[in-house]
Image (cartoon, helix red, strand yellow):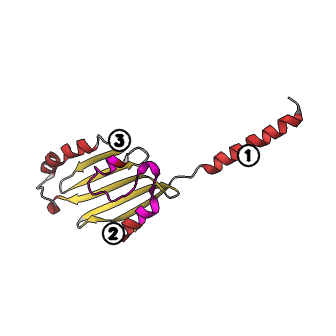
Amino acid sequence: MNLKKFIPILLILVLAIGLVACGKEKEEINTLKGEAAPNIKTTLTLYHKGDKLTKMIQVYDIEYRHTQFLDGTEAKEAIEPKIAELNKIEGYNEKVDYKDDLMTTTVEMDFTKISKENLKKIPGLNIDGDPKNGLSYQETLDSYTKQGFKEK
């Protein structure tokens, strides 16, 4: 190949690589703290690329005295079958750590995998939209901020 043909091809390759590298948005993480309901201490970790919410992790600390359960054994018997059903949803994972006086529930939702239909099956989730089209990080942040959550 002669040099006159090689240089334009090389320039096109350099430009293409530059455009691909610039097009990749870095995933950012924000953490909020508040109460999802009275006496339920909550930490939310929001993962996003630009305004697209990609993942959310919710951690709830719930004291048994604020529930209908007397202890962890009773709570586990009632809760685990429901969690097992929810964990069948692709992109959803929930686990509970039953301690002496409280339970810590961790819910992880991967919005790149979860469908709009399955999103509706998750109790207490206040996110509108279709994850396949991209949920708005800013709208989600604003919603939780209005509920009294503060950035950590």
Q: Which mark is residue 90?
A: 3
Cβ–Cβ under 8 Å for marks 3 and 2? no
Please tell me the numbered disc located at residue 147.
Answer: 2
Q: Is residue 66 left or right of residue 7?
A: left
Q: Is residue 134 left or right of residue 64?
A: right
Which class describes the residues within 10 Å of circle 2: few (<14), some (14-19), or many (20+)? few
Q: Which residues are magenta?
A: 117-141
**Residue 140 position in % (x across, y down):** 41, 62
Q: Residues within 10 Å of mark 1 (few under 14, many from 20)?
A: few
Q: Is residue 53 above or below residue 36?
A: above
Residue linked to disc 1: 15
* Quarter placement of the C terminus: bottom left
Q: Secondary structure at mark 3?
A: loop
Which one is earlier in the sequence, the residue at label 1 or at label 2? 1
Tag 3 near tag 1, CB within 8 Å: no
The outermost residue toward the top is: 1
Residue 112 magenta-drawn? no
Q: Is residue 15 shown to the viewer in this render?
A: yes
Residue at (74%, 40%) from the top-left corner? 13
